[in-house]
Amino acid sequence: MANKTENNIRLKVKDHSVSGEVFELIQNKAFGFLETFPQPSPEKLPEYYKSDDYISHTDSKRNLFEKVYHLVKKFSLAQKLKLINACGSSEKKLLDIGCGTGDFLKIAQDNQWQIFGIEPNAQARTIANYKTGNRVFDTEALSKFQPESFDVITLWHVLEHLPNLEQQIQIFKKALKKDGTLIIAVPNHGSFDAKHYRQFWAAYDVPRHLWHFNKTSISNLFSKVSMIVIKTKPMFFDAFYVSLLSEKYKSGTMHFFRAFYIALVSNLKALVSNEASSLIFILKNH
């Protein structure tokens, strides 16, 4: 998508997790989001996920940080279940794209949802299938679902990872029932913590995050396929997690109290602006 020019480069950001390489964030003029430049080829992209610290692909609880992550995750799963239950679907068919190790699918399945998952990472997919009774598939299955199959499609911090963005969105729309609901959670670079940490903001996570959204760019992107944002919801816990990592990237140490303060300020500001560190977008066809 990107046509690189000097005047639309917003930031230079380092891959702190795997490669140590530096990437540029360039504004997409059509939709307003930021693009990672250069983007790795589809063949090379999986190499950037090969890290023991990529927590969503494992169920590790090796240290206090990971234990806290999983504690917060339990609360988050309950909130996600409440959100999809509020969609009022009768058949209760759910597709979770980028489902990781399958915890959200499992809790939905336990609450009478017919579940289907997509997960490209083989290790995470194996764990998810153990939990869900083999309801999780590789990415090629996504284009094979019948049109208008699902009441709810969810992407929890997944959209920012997907190559061929506009093509993927067309696939989601096709798979969703006409009265279905698309729920997307993404980091929000319009938040206070993003502006505070700038190139050290952990939620840029280049080059695994290919796109970097704010409220306007999500609306612009989905309006092209005649979908509208009917509601946004903040993900307040994300500010604390992201700020801890951002402190580590900035100074080499997780300054807990400093990170807590920045996250708290970000969340308090978001109560007024709705510019939380991460946002959930609820979309419908129109």
Image: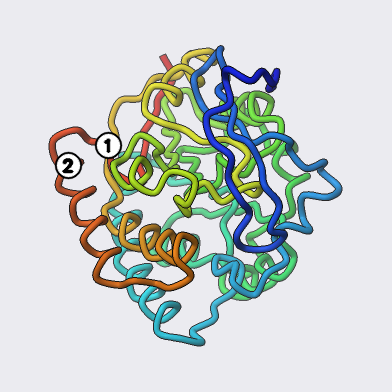
Q: Is residue 62 left or right of residue 22?
A: left
Q: Is residue 94 visible?
A: no
In the rendered image, which quarter is residue 110 located in? bottom left
Seen from the viewer's position, the closer of residues 286 and 262 is 262
Q: Is residue 42 visible?
A: yes
Residue 182, placed above or below residue 15: above
The residue at 63%/39% (across/down) is 210
For label 1, count other residues whose C-alpha is less than 10 Å away and answer few (under 14), some (14-19) or many (20+): many
Q: Are marks 2 and 1 in contact (CB under 8 Å)?
A: yes
In the rendered image, which quarter is residue 238 located in? bottom left
Which quadrant is the C terminus positioned in? top left
Residue 16, placed above or below residue 231: below
The residue at 51%/36% (across/down) is 212
Which quadrant is the N terminus positioned in? top right
| Residue 233 pos. (x, y %) | 27, 41
| Residue 260 pos. (x, y %) | 24, 64
Q: Residue tagged by mark 1? A: 275
Q: Amino acid at mark 2?
A: Lys
Label 2 element class: helix
Q: Tell me the distance, in whole angstroms, between the alpha carbons under discs 2 and 1.
A: 8 Å
Residue 31, placed above or below residue 109: above
Q: Is residue 36 left or right of residue 263?
A: right
| Residue 221 pos. (x, y %) | 51, 20
Q: Residue tagged by mark 2? A: 269
Q: Is residue 230 left or right of residue 150?
A: left
Name the residue at the right extreme. Answer: 43
